[in-house]
Image (spheres, rainbow, N blue to C red):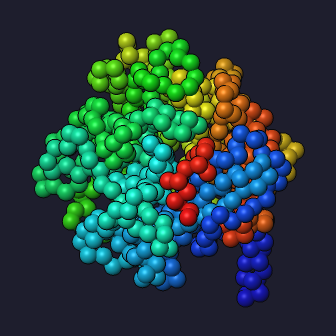
Amino acid sequence: MRKVAFTVAAILLARSHAEDTGYEAGFSDFRQEWIQEPLTIKGTLPEWLVGGAHVMNGVALWGFPKRRMRHNLDGYAKVHAVEFTSSTTAAFSGQFVRSAFYNASIKKDDVTAGLLFEETTPPRLALPLQNALAPNDNININVVRINGKMALISDLLGTVYVNETMGTEEVCVDGHMPWAKQSFVDVPAFPEGMAVTMGSAHPLSHGLSADRDTGDYLGIAAATQAVSFQPIKSEYLRLFRAKVETGWQHREEVITLAVPRAPYMHAFGLVTPEGAKSGPVANYSFAVLVHHPFYMDLTEEFPRYKIPMEEIWEFKTEEKAFFYVVDLHNNTLVANLTFNGEPFLYSHVLNSFQVDGHIYIDLVAYRDIFFKRYSFDVLLNKTARDASTGSQMLRFKLDIATGSVTEQDLLPGTDIELPTINEYFKGRQNCYAWSWENNFELPTNTSTGATGFARMAATKFDLCESEKQEKTIRTPFYRPHTYYGETFFVPRPGSTQEDDGVVLVPALDGQRGRMALLVLDAATMKLVAEVPLPEGVGGYITHTRFLFDYAKSDTLQALFV
Ligand SMILES: [Fe+2]
């Protein structure tokens, strides 16, 4: 009997080794750090990338021997940067963000207090409100640049700034990295008794990263009654403006919408005047906010707050979704449209634009709570991850005159995340998107590699042709057992052609257990160059940004001094 069991186990082991090689190992802890490690590039970079750096937010540590995290996005923030020092050389830095959460955890060799998507194994012992009142400064989602300063942001109300001035609240990294933690100022303040529980990890700039992100940012914030003994009368959704001169934390109201309940919203859209040329926009015409029925119910959990966060997410499939269109010339709500179709929720907004007076918005949409996919119960279990609900790229057409909203599956048969566009086309109709794909459908007669969720590609999609032909038109890049992060499009300076540039994408070669930053031709998706990263680099990359003139900025250099 024992022998049979051993044989079965051996077969299972062999099968799991053959499928998705190295995928799960990508979620091991990667604790090593680097500062300005010299690298040799395979191939030759376009000259115009030299002097810039690709900065990647992410996570690379999920606990300690005595206690482990259970959700990918709970991991400790680690920032990686690949600086292109010449067309054949690069310098690599990778550092954990010395947040108060990280510092306390390292000191105790344990996961300390703070809100997590899922409670740890074994669970932490927490006093009432202890997690809610913890610093909650593990900002591991996005990276933006405002007024020449790089900032790490997420949906949490925190920002990690690389700040050249020494403040009283700063947190130093290895004694010489000045992170400064600052608090938000909302103007006007939200009503008494409200807790501003969420910001947005995807503010949209009037400038563009390719233009050094000059320009104001627009963003969204939600005010909810997190702690209340009274019935909720109204909650608030606000579109705000963060001006260059006052910085990211000073948020001036554009419009505040009173809603019965404020949803969790990760992203929104901006629309240029119709017919506007590609490039930076001084004045957008509209903002589009999509109120999906996806909520965080914090009131139910008061006063415990030591609850697993997975219990507070609510996808109210019996409720409708609403599309709010804000006129940015006079800061008024010009349309509040109800969508009567199948309930959905969404993670990201690809783009929004107007054609012939109609407004369109493209969303990475789901029919189930997408956070579940990034639980280790799912990610590290092949059966569960292959069975998890995938995304759809849904295009919604808003007819303001008639009040109708129609939906179209723009890229049938795809399962994508973290898509990007040429930012010069933000707010105007674009034809291309770049994204990683899960459950990638290999062309016939092609070698298999990983299967299901872990079978990935880095893909260029032709949205215009896909819409015309009512099928997905794509140009993929893929290798056996290779797993991709965000595909970030960088436009070639001076070019107006939408797909003229490169796509930068971190890729884990599961068979070798090594990560590289790939430089792909954005038009053809052919490999231009490859930057092999040092042994020991790993973890999950969230959002990324290419920063031109990295080497010239003292502020940015402070990140990895
Ligand atoms: Fe995001």
Quarter of the image with the N terminus is bottom right
Task: Please report the residue visible at 20 percent of the width from the left and 43 percent of the height from the top.
Answer: 190
Quarter of the image where one finds residue 114: bottom left
Q: Is residue 221 left or right of residue 388?
A: left
Q: Is residue 298 visible?
A: yes
Quarter of the image where one finds residue 21: bottom right
Q: Where residue 439 sits: x, y (%)?
A: 67, 48
Task: Please report the residue visible at 49 percent of the width from the left and 15 percent of the height from the top.
Answer: 274
Q: Where residue 14 sits: x, y (%)?
A: 78, 72
Q: Where residue 504 sits: x, y (%)?
A: 68, 46
Q: Is residue 338 visible?
A: no
Task: Please report the residue visible at 76 percent of the width from the left and 41 percent of the height from the top.
Answer: 46
Q: Is residue 443 above or below residue 161?
A: above
Task: Please report the residue visible at 36 percent of the width from the left and 60 percent of the height from the top.
Answer: 181
Foreground residue, 38 or 541?
38
Quarter of the image with the C terminus is bottom right
Quarter of the image where one finds residue 344: top left
